[in-house]
Image: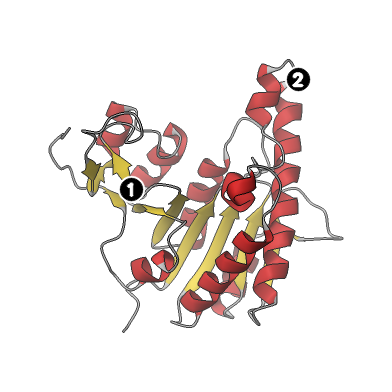
Amino acid sequence: MEPVYKRILLKVSGEALAGEQGYGIDPEVLVRLAEEVKDVTALGTQVAIVIGGGNIFRGIAASVGGMERATADYMGMLATVINALALQDAIEKTGIPTRVLSAIEMRAVAEPYIRRRAMRHLEKSRVVIFAAGTGNPFFTTDTAAALRAVEIGAEVILKATKVDGVYSADPKKDKGAQRLPRLSYIEVLNRGLQIMDATAISLCMDNKLPIVIFDFTRRGNIKRIVLGEAVGSVVTGDNPPLRG
């Protein structure tokens, strides 16, 4: 089967890397993610990844505790670099060449982020991992994912979560919650659905970049999406009626 996407950006939270242990990096999750990335690159699809850092340090939580927000955010960015290096190691062990590009310069461990260099790596079938968010405080890694996806010309953002899409209410609390297979950007913003932050959603809306929210814990979902299967929930510029 031919992939429907030639270039994707995968957004993985730091919490996803922690797996069931809830903190740090679970080696089993790293290995599984690396294998799934390899399966997608085997289709000929170019893969870029933005990784969070919440499994190590959460800037917003630290700022609530009294730390200066800018300082806390920079510490969170450094946490994403740790995750990026771990993911790079796991992916390269599958035989796929990988590059970490950091928005905060640290040449000993990563290349500085340069848009044209990132695109050149992708064209050479290297997996590109974007670290350190946008390089600026007060922006989340969701916003970094939207920004990098637009910059490199990705055709879709795949947002990895622990649920199989977007629901009208919290399915853990409301048994009547309905899964919404397709939503518009405006619907997400108006209903306050916590898919990505408002800045990220607005950036995707302005650039007509679709977002697929899917269950990261189910093996093979990334490949299914790339091959065009209906997985999770899709946020696009279409304007379906409000539901739920």
Q: Secondary structure at mark 2?
A: loop
Residue 209 visible here: no
Toward the viewer: 78 or 200? Answer: 78
Q: Residue at x 67, y 33 (%)?
A: 58
Q: Please name the amino acid that badge 2 sits on.
A: Met
Q: Is residue 76 above or below residue 12?
A: above
Q: Position of residue 215 (x, y in %)?
A: 41, 54
Q: Which residue is mark 1?
A: 165
Depth order, front residue of 23/95: 23
User: Is residue 152 or residue 140 the one in the foreground?
Assistant: 140
Indicate left or right for 143 with 3 as reference: right
**Dot 1: within a 10 Å radius of its alpha carbon, few (fewer than 14), some, or many (20 or more) residues?**
many
Q: Is residue 6 left or right of residue 102?
A: left
Instruction: List the residue tagged with mark 2.
Output: 67
Mark 1 belongs to which amino acid? Gly
How far apart are labels 2 and 1 at the CA level? 34 Å
Side of 228 where 71 appears, left or right: right
For the C terminus, the quadrant is top left
Q: Position of residue 42 (x, y in %)?
A: 49, 83
What secondary structure is marked by label 1?
Answer: loop
The picture places residue 134, in percent across and down from the top left corner, at 62, 44
Asked if residue 69 lies left or right of residue 204, the reply is: right
